[in-house]
Image: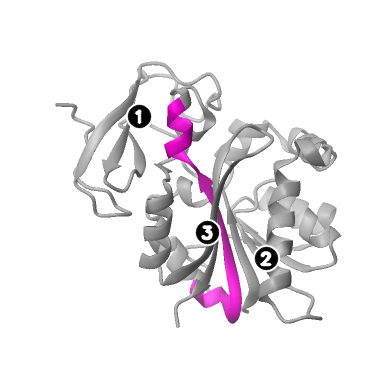
Amino acid sequence: MSSLKPNFCPITGDMDSRLVFSYSNPPSVEIPYIRSQDEPYHREVWQFLPSGHFISTHEMKVLTSYDGHYLEATYGNNASMTATFERIINLPPERSDNTGRFLAVERFASRWLDMGIIPSVLDIGSGLGVFPHAVHRAGWSCTAIDPDWRCVAHYNDTIGVTGICGDFMSIEATSQFDIVTLNKVLEHVIDPITMLQRVHHWLKPSGFVYVEVPDGEVASKYGCDREEFTIEHLHIFSVASTAILASRAGFEIQTLTRLQEPSTKYTIRAFLSQKI
């Protein structure tokens, strides 16, 4: 039996699991230098049953801090980050994951929120700021949280939205928002339930949450060499585990869909409201 076999699923509580993928080399799509290069690569992906949730297990040293190391490993420097941002925001709509993402949020907001209001949005873990840029361009109010000060300076100076620098898990809520979004964030943290629970403090009672996570159920059918299963993803979700996550964090699912985005990523999108 593998020494990396997990005892139970931290999302669903499932105890039955099966080995899905075993890696002795990183997937070709994995970000270089996000882990120590001085040790052999060994990692496993396990799926829990019956929920279908996946977790990645290993004992390697990984640059898990998102306050600098991750940006440097991913983009190299500030100039490269800005160039990547410009390239993405100028993609044609049919090639842009973000265009589809914002349109989905906009459509749901038009049904959920009162007519005539200008929505206020809190985006958690904003990275390059591509989604906040779309929110700002639509004339909505946007605040973006990220632990990297360079990203936050980019939000303030280049995009024109309010940036908050810090770890969402330790920042106290200073105001509440109509919409809180977590785009491809929850798969990166050890305890997604606790992170999603903290959203209640930032969300107006009449508001909603938009969650986007990688869809492991579909992606696993196409092999191990996919972005959904790279080392920085501690969790890879199923439809069932997404629903369980929402419920255990105190939310109700209003809609849940799965899709393949223009980038070819398999994704689960969920709109949540607070339990009454």
Q: Which residue is mark 1?
A: 60
Residue at the (65%, 48%) spot, across then down? 127
| Side of 235 where 75 appears, left or right | right
In the image: residue 61, left or right of residue 116: left
Q: Name the residue tied to disc 2.
A: 108
Q: Quadrant of the C terminus?
A: bottom left
Rendered view: 258 above or below 171? above
State the residue position of label 3.
167
Query: Which secondary structure, mark 2?
Result: helix
First along the sequence among labels 2 and 3 = 2
Q: Counting other residues with Cα less than 10 Å from the Cα at mark 3, is it few (<14), some (14-19), or many (20 or more)?
A: some
| Residue type marked 1 | Met
Which disc, if any, is residue 175?
none
| Quarter assignment of residue 19 | top left
Q: Give me the residue at 51% from left, 69% from top.
A: 199
* Coloration mode: one colour
Location of residue 197 with respect to 131 vertically, above or below: below
Q: How many C-alpha atoms fall within 10 Å of the one at disc 1: few (<14), some, or many (≥20)?
A: some
Above-or-below relation of 129 to 243: above
Which of discs 2 and 1 lies nearer the camera? The answer is: 2
Sequence order check: which comes first, mark 2 or mark 1? 1
Residue 120 in sight here: no
Is residue 273 visible in the rendered image? The answer is yes
Work out which quarter of the rendered image holds the N terminus and state it: top left
* Residue bounds of the magenta highlight: 200-221
Position in image of residue 239 (x %, y %): 43, 50
Looking at the image, which is closer to me, 238 or 2? 238
Q: Nearer the viewer, residue 46 or 152?
A: 46
Q: Secondary structure at mark 1?
A: loop
- Which marked residue is nearer to the observer: mark 2 or mark 3? 2
Q: What is the count of numbered marks?
A: 3
